[in-house]
Image (spheres, rainbow, N blue to C red):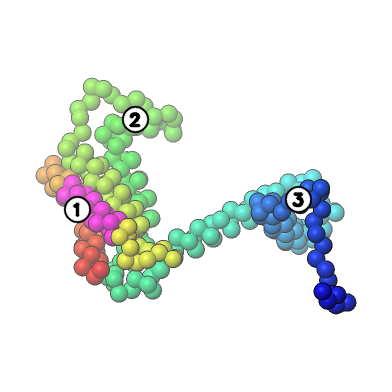
Amino acid sequence: MAAPKKNETRKQKRDPNQPVPKRPKKKTLVLKVLLLGALLLVGVWGGLYSVQLGRGPWGWSGEDWSGFATFSQEQVSEAASNASETFNKVDWEAIKDSITENSKQLYGQITGWDDKLDERLAKLRRVEGEEGAEGAAGGPAAAADPSAPPPPQYELDYGDGGDKLREAMQIYKRSFPKSGQDPSSPALQRELRKSKGLFREAHELLSKAQEGAADAGNQVLADEIEEAVVVCGQYLQDCSKREMAR
């Protein structure tokens, strides 16, 4: 048998009496990476905070360290907010051929309408007696009078219709694809159909409430409800057009 060449390295055999060496655990490696990343972030934030203060960490007072804790929390919140905004951003370019020219505008005004309905329905229900009226000088709310007559049907219909309109808007919002989602996925189509059904129910209730308020001579409330009827009809029409576009 030929002798091994000088530049060849012989593989050493493992001593069977020695324990088998353990492989590094993946979890430990991941934790080390995360810890290193966290330390780097803290270092970056410390540098930014030092620039604001005009002195390094070695010269920070107790108040400075407290301020750094607040600064770090703000950075985490801002990063989380930016990540959420990026993740939840609608991919308008991917769905440009399957939406109407008003879809983007209707999507954008949902937050404003949600706040408006919150305010209007809260005011309405205080009138109904479901919530006591506010006490004098901003004091505690007074208890509802159990002997008071029940609210008229048009106010009840307005409250139910307003609740359905808010729910329909939120589901409508979920029917648009976010970054990375398939615009034609069955899940998004189900959300669209569900929102359409709720818009239809809301439109019927609100129309009935508007008519009842007008018949009762409460024109101020009738005009308020009519605005919600018109907006609800716009969303309902948009849902129908988007269904056909798909």
Q: Residue 131, position in %: x, y?
A: 33, 32
Residue identifier under label 2: 132
Q: Which residues are magenta?
A: 189-207
Q: Magenta: predominant secondary structure element? A: helix
Q: Position of residue 185 (x, y in %)?
A: 33, 63
Mark nearer the viewer, 3 or 1: 3
Is 188 in front, or is 201?
Answer: 188
Q: Which residue is mark 3?
A: 20
User: What separation in Å lies between label 2 and label 1 (alpha carbons)?
Assistant: 32 Å
Name the quarter where the N terminus is drawn.
bottom right
> 10 Å neighbourhood of mark 1: few (<14), some, or many (≥20)?
many
Q: How many marks?
A: 3
Q: Are marks 2 and 3 in contact (CB under 8 Å)?
A: no
Q: CA distance from mark 3 to mark 1?
A: 70 Å
Residue occupying image coordinates x 17% and y 41%:
154
| View extreme (front): residue | 1
Q: Tell me the kind of residue under disc 3.
A: Val
Q: Which residue is drawn at the image coordinates 26% and 53% (left, top)?
A: 194
